[in-house]
Amino acid sequence: MQTIDLADSDLRTLNATLQAAATGGGNQTAWEVLNPRGAHALAVGLDGPIEVTVRGSTGYYCAGMNKEATVHVTGSAGPGVAENMMSGTVVIEGDASQYAGATGRGGLLVIKGNASSRCGISMKGIDIVVHGNVGHMSAFMAQAGTLVVLGDAGEALGDSLYEARLFVRGSVKSLGTDCVEKEMRPEHLALLADLLERAGAPAAPEEFRRYGSARKLYTFDIDNVQEY
Amino acid sequence: MSDTPRARTLPIQSATFTNEINAEIRRAAETGIYDIRGGGAKRRVPHFDDLLFLGASISRYPLEGYRETCATNVTLGTRFAKKPIELDIPITIAGMSFGALSGPAKEALGRGATMAGTSTTTGDGGMTEEERGHSKLLVYQYLPSRYGMNPDDLRRADAIEIVVGQGAKPGGGGMLLGQKISDRVAEMRTLPKGIDQRSACRHPDWTGPDDLEIKILELREITGWEKPIYVKIGGTRPYFDTALSVKSGADVVVIDGMQGGTAATQDVFIEHVGLPTLACIRPAVQALQDLGMHRKVQLVVSGGIRTGADVAKALALGADAVSIGTAALVAIGDNDPKWEAEYQKLGTTAGAYDDWHEGLDPAGITTQDPVLAARLDPVEAGRKLRNYLKVMTLEAQTIARACGHNHLHNLEPEDLCALTMEAAAMARVPLAGTDWWPGKPGGGL
């Protein structure tokens, strides 16, 4: 394993080194980052199957736009972790701040603590598994992908939802506009079982409820004007 | 009884309740939905037409029209980017999405811009092969919706434009109605086919200038600090928004006035929110000057640019370049009178057609209908755009030489006067025949 210590190195060197390792196809596929101390934009734009372990907590946008890489943060993550992720895996051992997985298009984001507000906002295909709770407005305008919450969800879950699938094991403080509870069918249980296993989440699929779009706001209708 | 007709009062139309207003009231009552349309503000607002160049005389002498050089090049992104954009002319093509425009229209814009030595810009919906393939210099927009956003396209762009707002609807998000959400558009945007798409008005993962600074850092780290990063704002508080863009680390600030077009939004938004382009430039330039960043962070102005005179006036007021959208569409065939019969069928007329959101454009530009889109020959349309850009540049050079300048960037506010009080106040140039403008420090004569 190669080590980069941010006490001795700077952000540009770190990202340039990791990006080169990801795309270079060499043998240095395992990397460790020490002393992140809340730095922003760590391990962003990776484009290849390397594994990066960040020992500590990160600032904004850790693992942003990740492709194929596995990024493991042993502490907590600041806003926008794994934003617009395309593929790969990002695991946060602690909590995640707001906008976790925002606009993500693929891959798996696992948050072993809690996620703050707007988790999965505008998600476009990413799978997110939160072992704890999620804050208000999570999955706002979520287009595709799956959000799994083992704990509780805050206010306005799934507001203005498109086709993303939401599963919550605990309570939901309130559903957002056009978000409704839906029937849990066998294919949903299978999907959940797979995601829970990959996320190392200690829960059974049968314990969850499913939420999705009522699709009433897909085309403008004056009779729904109070919902806009 | 006399046969002489009684004297009668003539019918008087209300200046408040005009026929147009009354028709809109009836339309709203009938349909229950606000009017949605494309384009920019149609109302008369103070504009570049309200300014005149003074030209050279005894106190200044002109350059020879065809013999002395008047350069037109501009470099964008000199502050931080390793690879700034070098343009031959200071006129760029503004962001317009595939979805709002057809594939051939995007191709035509790329072809025309490339032949003229300038850049074109993606839009809300991602980058298409048509425009990347035909645009030597392509600016990739980073929008609140993030439709189609991906790091590969980010890296193959020549610059990145973070869109905070646009002049037609500052504070509003994009809109693309179901008629234009074709299979391809739906796939690019990860949306169900045929829905009325409403984009977010705010970015999903940052709010405020402190966050924006970090977002810009992230984009630079992903792209190796190579790409110029623009910040595009709708013209509302140009001094502060420009200053905050600079503070956030922008290489280029793009400011778009209310005459700037959109593919679709509410008419009430277009006509009643935002500032005229003319009112945006001097405050933005002032902000750059106060920060010691004028010409270091480049300023691009858009919204109602139509002629070389408009280009020259924007540059004289301190812009580094301008951007055109509506004018470029007109150049490639939008609202062409040759389609008048079809415009009539749509209940409109050439020059007034603005229902771009309906996807029925007879010119084949603002549509996703393959039959209509096939009407536009991208090669011929690209040639027309090239010609138009060249004409605008020649016009601007003509004026600059007449004012004695050997580069368009040497035009200055002292070359201008204003025809109206409003224009004088906004442009901060003297009312014609005086040395005074409203708000001038120290007064006038």
Image: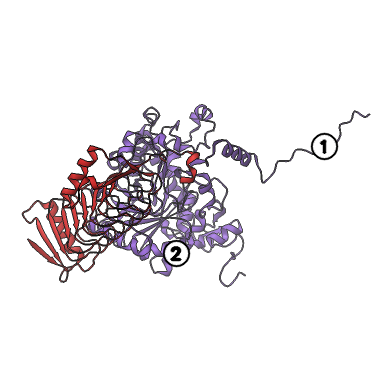
In this rendering, does residue B434 appear at all? yes
| Coloring applied to the structure | by chain
* Numbered marks: total: 2
The residue type indicated by label 1 comes to: Arg
On the image, the x and y values in percent for residue A80 come to 28, 57
Nearer to me, B12 or B287: B12
**Residue beneath label 2, please?**
B240
Q: Where is residue B372 in the image (x, y as percent from the top left)?
A: 40, 29
In the image, farthest residue toward the bottom:
B442
- The colour chain A appears in is red
Residue placed under numbered mark 1 in the picture = B8
Q: Nearer the viewer, residue B18 or B344?
A: B18
- What hue does chain B carry in this figure? purple
Task: Identify the secondary structure beneath mark 1.
Answer: loop
* x and y, in percent, of residue A42 in the image: 21, 61
Q: Is residue B276 left or right of residue A103?
A: right
